[in-house]
Image (tube, rainbow, N blue to C red):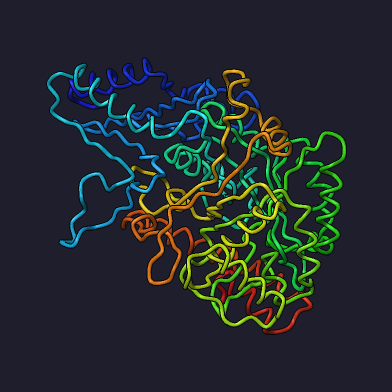
Amino acid sequence: MAANPKMRNFARSLEGELNQRGFKTVNAKRVNQRLMQEGLLKKGGSCGLVSGKEKILNRGIGSKRSGFNVFVKEEDNRVLVYYMNPDTGPDAPMLRRNEKGKMPAGQNYNILKTYKGIQNPAAYAEKVAKDIAHYASLKPDTEYRMESHLHSGWMFGGYIGGSKQIKDDGMSNIMHVLRVMAHTNRDVVALTSHNAFNERQFRAMEIIAQEMGMVMVPSVELTIPGRTPNGPHVCCYLADAGVAMNEFNLIALKGREDYAMPPFNDVGQFPEIVQKLFAQMVKGTRELFMSVAHPFNFYTAERNLYEVGALSSIECGPYSFVEVMQLMHYFQGVEGWNFGMSDKDTIPNLDNRSLQECVHDICATHLPPGTKRTPNSIAYAFALQMQFDGTVHNTFTGTDDHYTPDMNYRSNGLPQVRGHTEIEMARVYAKMADRKPTSQELISWLLSNQILTTGFVYLEHEDGYLRVPKGRKSYNKATSAAAKKMHAAGQKLYQKAVIRDLATFKISPSEMVNLAHSFGIGD
């Protein structure tokens, strides 16, 4: 705790002021107790969500109100207060520097205040609480923000379930992920592991999320084979863990068990699997919601990986333009922006005439004139077109984050600050009980169009590019170093698994090189 009694009193007074304004403090002790009671944490252990010198407060705990989180940390003789400006309007801060290279006041979307030497802790705490309440008011109570596409890999300091088996192709510690979710004011979180759903992991995350004022939705990202064992990706959101396990057993476990890497699959063909999933969705209680992930998948000319996007897979086959467009009617959503895709690499000329014409038409209709065709700008236009013609009602923004570093009071540039999926709850809010909805309620409301999702991205149009402003995606040095370290560790960990799997694939040498490049493995 802070050595200075007045600073300690300031921290406690601020917590009290925020409590009076409807913010509740995350009960770290209760989190650990619940995990231990269900055998998800060793007796006497800690999941590491909250440090001993820290408080996390959220106005959404025990309430249906959307979340707004504040981190308060006592450190030596000072107190750190950290929260995020949730503004999504035209004047939202972007970390843009002026002509003199200086950062104008108020341009940092991550607000870190350092307090020390305070003489009147109670009065100053009231002032700080009023400032926080102002920023919280910029996020309406009825506006839920969703993390709709996310990958992990680590759990409580080790691999999920205590096993060294690869569970997903991410390297994130789940506690780091959930702290970032809190800082960026997520209300709904979907961990979309490739072809995997782990009940113990989900239950642990569900408990922690409940105590933090968030909703965990059981999810999986299915990779459906096409020309290679890493074909079009589909994000599936399920009503509850039981439904998720049924779908997982129905589809994902039908694939080959000798594949070491989760994104590789062998479960059938795209049309067959999508129609089978849809049949499950319309049967009985309709507990499955499907969205197309990164519909136009392209990294660089050397790492195009067209087959991983439903729309871009038309370029390389085996699915025709007509087939894919017909299948789109089975989906309820499309990911219109994915931060794992590029917003600066323009695609080369397409060989497939139908796809070429489709891309030309949707870009001409939905993008500003002269916009360069990047994978994200094409996906953005495609999602708008699918929504415009009534094929789907929902759009998503996916961070697709595999390497989430610890928030550590330095969150500049993280994918989660670049955009989110917005859920407008206004139509159901009045009749909701004063608690967060269950995942089952959310899926039911989505399927009946009582609530809708909209992908939101902080965008600018500059030099012909539709892209996230540099100030929203520039890491600070500490965060950049942490992300690079995790990425390098992931590549090292997965390299042997990828090479082993590639040896079993019956694909051309060029396709094999392309797949290897997609995991950072050279020739």
8 to 374, vertically: above or below: above
Residue 402 horizontal side relative to residue 6, left or right: right
Q: In terms of depth relative to the viewer, which is nearer, 43 or 3? A: 3
Q: Horizontal and vertical percent for residue 73?
A: 31, 31
Q: Quadrant of residue 1?
A: top left
Q: In terms of depth relative to the viewer, which is nearer, 273 or 166? A: 273
Residue shown at the point (59%, 50%) measured from the top left: 396
Residue 137 horizontal side relative to residue 296, left or right: left
Residue shown at the point (29%, 24%) measured from the top left: 129
Q: Horizontal and vertical percent for residue 455?
A: 55, 49
Q: Is residue 165 visible?
A: no
All told, the count of numbered labels is 0
Residue shown at the point (71%, 66%) measured from the top left: 230
Q: Horizontal and vertical percent for residue 148?
A: 59, 46
Q: Is residue 281 visible?
A: yes
Q: Horizontal and vertical percent for residue 347?
A: 55, 76
Residue 473 horizontal side relative to residue 355, left or right: left
Q: In terms of depth relative to the viewer, which is nearer, 107 or 8? A: 107
